[in-house]
Image (cartoon, grey):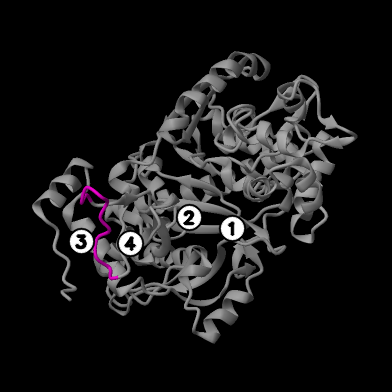
Amino acid sequence: MNHHTMLTSEDKKQIASRGSHVADVEQQLTYFKKGFPFLNVLRPATLGDGIIKLEAKNSSETIAQYMQLIDVGLKPAKFVPASGAASRMFQLLFSFAELADTNEKAYDLLQEERFKNVNLFFDQLSRFAFYKKLIAALDGELMQNGRLKYVEILDMLLSERGLNYGFLPKGLLDFHLYLEGARTPVEEHMVEGALYCADKNGLVKLHFTVSPEHLSLFQHKIKEKKFELETRYGVNYDITFSDQKPYTDTIAVDQDNQPFRLNDNKLLFRPAGHGALLDNLNDVDGDILFIKNIDNVVPDRLKEETTLSKMALSSLLIEYQKRIFNYLRVLDSNTYSLEQLQEIKTFAADELNITYPIQAENNPSELAKFLVQKLNRPIRVCGMVKNEGEPGGGPFWAENSDGSISLQVVESSQIDPNNPLQQLILSQSTHFNPVDLICGVRDYRGNKFDLMTYRDPETGFVSIKSKDGKTLKAQELPGLWNGAMANWITFFVEVPIITFNPVKTINDLLRQEHQPV
């Protein structure tokens, strides 16, 4: 069997029509065959060794420091990946509904251990923010013969006959209850934006990445709430949307690593995970960009801690950025002394964890060139949360392909599962990445960096999926906060656990942090 993959001229036309390059697709095919190299982690980043602990300032000091940055013209923007459908939140309810075709059957199944979380869901129904809407959809009747109408409740919650929650995006589900009614994550992000993302003219820039089929729903929700929230917080919203661009999709292959073909012999391309959003982030206009997932929101009573944390991280970012910009101007002037060069080198080594190639050691002009290249990069400050058993990427010291060492957010899939030492290092991680980033995306001349040039293409991964009952292999691009930002100047900062409250399953909304009181 010939294992050399040939793309036909029809394939090449199809690739071009998507805005992709044939060379990129061929590179993806190569990765399927040879796999992605594992990352070599040296040790976890910990407090004092890669993770910064901010000294506790009182809140008024933190706010004053941040507002001063805004007053001198800092323009923030907020970037929220919101493309996912919420169906994953309801997985257990879907599988329960499939088995429970009558309420009798449902009642029996609920006695089983495997459905204890479904039991909890029904038990606590009235605590969900969508409860009133659900009752209305059921014409006010939850019970029948003294028992809940399990089948009808799930049908009204999940299908388009009722609230259609099984098919809506996460951003548009009722998460939190207030006196004036329920609020969705999109609204919570609008409120958050008003609290820490307004420029000095009160303009709040928010950008959501959404799937095309959900766009009009998002626009409708925002239109409905915009005036009310602008009036309440004294701001103006500038809200934009984008979807994952087709040319960032990656090709799928069969089990022999040959291109997977659809019935009409066309190639199959699939969205390449959140790493594909680097393109979208690249288009957002702002001096600093806040990144936070759509489902990581809390009710107003808990927002202060998040707001203060964001302000403190922003101030840290700008402080470092000022120092870096000053040094770049010195290097740019070509009139620096050897003392200054030494000072910059020490700063880069001690504060930015930059290691030096041997040839730069004794040659001032080589060293200056190297320093310019290392200092003139986008900067990210990543909030890190103490690990309380949540899965997700963590902060590590890792070796780069050129032998230098840097701080990286590492997913477990990037680490060799058959290397006991690497697995041990992985297990010693004390913190994890809650996707709480602030990005400095302009250079010292005020121009935007092209973020596409700072990623590590070697950090994707391959996953097994299926299409029309046939197995296929898919490829994800380097994740947005690991490989896609691998070559950024990186700071890890410990943030309070309360700033991280994701909703992965429907019952997460029952957690104290998502409840009204």
How far from the left and from the top, in percent, is residue 417?
50, 79
Q: Is residue 312 visible?
A: no
Mark 2 or 3: the one toward you: 3
Decide: is 167 above or below 136. below
Amino acid carrying mark 2 in the image: Trp
Decide: is 408 above or below 449. below
Classed neighbour count for the residue bearing mark 4: other residues with Cα under 10 Å, few (<14), some (14–19), many (≥20): some
Marks 1 and 4: in contact by CB < 8 Å? no
Give the quarter of the figure containing the N terminus: bottom left
Disc 2: which residue: 481
What separation in Å lies between label 4 and label 2 (alpha carbons)? 13 Å
Q: Is residue 347 visible?
A: yes
What separation in Å lies between label 4 and label 1 (alpha carbons)? 21 Å
Q: Could you tell which of marks 1 and 3 lies nearer the N-terminus?
A: 3
Classed neighbour count for the residue bearing mark 2: other residues with Cα under 10 Å, few (<14), some (14–19), many (≥20): many
Disc 1: which residue: 433
Magenta segment, which residues?
256-266
Q: Could you tell which of marks 4 and 2 lies nearer the N-terminus?
A: 4
For mark 1, give the secondary structure.
loop
Disc 3: which residue: 26
- Most distant residue in the right direction: 146
Q: Could you tell which of marks 3 and 4 lies nearer the N-terminus?
A: 3
Q: Nearer the viewer, residue 38 or 15?
A: 15
Q: Is residue 292 in the magenta section? A: no
For mark 4, give the secondary structure.
helix
For mark 3, give the secondary structure.
helix
Classed neighbour count for the residue bearing mark 3: other residues with Cα under 10 Å, few (<14), some (14–19), many (≥20): some
Amino acid carrying mark 4 in the image: Pro
Q: Could you tell which of marks 4 and 1 lies nearer the N-terminus?
A: 1
